[in-house]
Image (tube, rainbow, N blue to C red):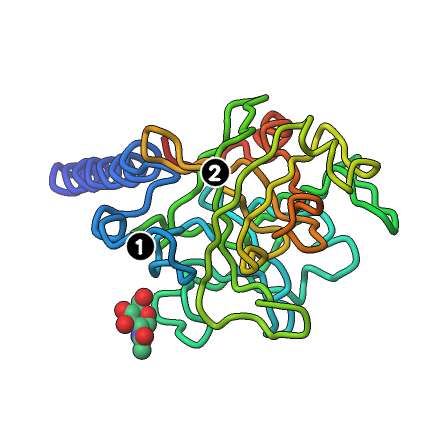
């Protein structure tokens, strides 16, 4: 091999190495989970129902034949956390995952993925009255790149308790009984109840320690999508996912709060299923 080609191979290797290094940096250290980009955070409207576009950039919509089927939250560059019941009775092959979405009629900048695998919790059970261990990890057919509109949510510390904290749900979910889904992303604030308060509600015979409940005073508090995240803003100005929306008769009435899978009870299980994927600090 002559000197020139030796040298070009060497410099090509250096360039590739640097490129790889840059990508790795961007994916693992240059991004922060649970934080919308600065310009978007500044636009945040407190109390409004309409979420500022892309202010919850981990939120994904899962469509089934073009209709909203469930919500979910991006946790790595190729995994979405959602509810088990979203996949138990439906074929994931006919579903599409939309990332970076705000308005259902505007696909500019939206990433669309199919689902290559769904891991429903081994102990997921479902009866007419309740689902238990209602949690699933969806693997996308192709990873996404993180950017202003696509950022993963932070997972909570194992066992973290969010009782008495305020949480937020967002979604395109149905706006009321017999109503269709919203075209734009809506949000609502809820108060997370303690285990004792949940046990005092009318739902007590169905309530389990791996669940959380939360309620909102307004009548508009129920627009989260099934499978979507209930997130809590930490003092570090970053959101962590406290719950997964799965069940609620109403949720404006403290006697009938919305019920959520308690994510902090499943952190180890979740992490076992995304080894090797890229996430943010
Ligand atoms: C569609 O979405 C893009 C990206 O979020 C945004 O810049 C654009 O203004 C939107 N278009 C309309 C008509 O709302």
Tag of residue 114:
none
Q: CA distance from mark 2 to mark 1?
A: 16 Å
Q: In the image, residue 28 lies at what x, y percent? A: 35, 34
Sort mark 2 into few (<14), some (14-19) or many (20+) by Cα contacts within 10 Å.
some
Report the front residue among 140 and 178: 178
- 33 relative position to 242: left or right: left
Q: Is residue 168 above or below residue 235?
A: below
SS for callout 1? loop
Q: What residue is shown at x 45% (from left), y 35% (from top)?
A: 240
> Which residue has dot 2 on it?
166
Q: In the image, residue 27 lies at what x, y percent? A: 34, 39
- 213 relative position to 32: left or right: right
For label 2, being within 8 Å of ligand 1 is answered: no
Q: In the image, residue 36 lies at what x, y percent? A: 32, 46
Sort mark 1 into few (<14), some (14-19) or many (20+) by Cα contacts within 10 Å.
few
Q: What residue is shown at x 74% (from left), y 51% (from top)?
A: 85
> Which residue has dot 1 on it?
45
SS for callout 2? strand
Report the front residue among 123 and 165: 165
Mark 2 or mark 1: name the one nearer the start of the chain.
Answer: 1
* CB within 8 Å, label 2 to label 1: no
Q: In the image, residue 92 lies at what x, y percent? A: 68, 59
Where's the C terminus, which quadrant? top left
Q: What residue is shown at x 35% (from left), y 71% (from top)?
A: 108
Q: Is residue 239 above or below residue 219?
A: above
Tell me where residue 120 sits by quadrant: top right
Q: What residue is shown at x 54% (from left), y 31% (from top)?
A: 275
Report the front residue among 120 and 27: 120
Return the residue found at the far right. Answer: 128
């Amino acid at each position: 091999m002559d000197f020139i080609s030796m040298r070009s191979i060497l410099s090509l290797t250096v360039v590739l190495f640097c490129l790889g290094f840059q990508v790795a940096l961007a994916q693992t250290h240059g991004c922060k989970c649970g934080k919308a980009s600065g310009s978007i955070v500044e636009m945040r409207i407190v109390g409004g129902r309409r979420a500022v576009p892309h202010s919850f950039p981990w939120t994904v919509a899962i469509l089934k034949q073009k209709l909203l089927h469930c919500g979910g939250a991006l946790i790595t560059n190729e995994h979405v956390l959602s509810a088990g019941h979203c996949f138990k009775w439906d074929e994931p092959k006919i579903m599409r995952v939309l990332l970076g979405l705000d308005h259902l009629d505007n696909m500019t900048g939206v990433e669309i993925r199919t689902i290559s695998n769904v891991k429903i919790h081994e102990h997921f059970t479902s009866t007419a009255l309740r689902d238990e261990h209602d949690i699933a990890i969806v693997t996308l057919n192709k990873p996404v790149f993180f950017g202003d509109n696509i950022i993963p949510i932070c997972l909570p510390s194992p066992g973290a308790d969010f009782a008495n904290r305020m949480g937020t749900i967002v979604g395109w979910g149905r706006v009321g009984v017999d109503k269709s889904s919203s075209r734009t992303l809506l949000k609502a604030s809820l108060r997370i109840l303690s285990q004792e308060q949940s046990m005092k509600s009318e739902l007590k015979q169905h309530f389990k320690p791996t669940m959380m409940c939360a309620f909102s005073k307004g009548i508009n508090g129920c627009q989260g999508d099934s499978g979507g995240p209930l997130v809590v803003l930490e003092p570090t100005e970053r959101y962590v996912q406290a719950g997964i929306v799965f069940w609620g008769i109403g949720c404006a009435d403290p006697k009938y709060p919305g019920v959520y899978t308690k994510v902090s009870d499943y952190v180890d299980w979740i992490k076992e299923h995304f080894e090797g994927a890229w996430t943010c600090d």
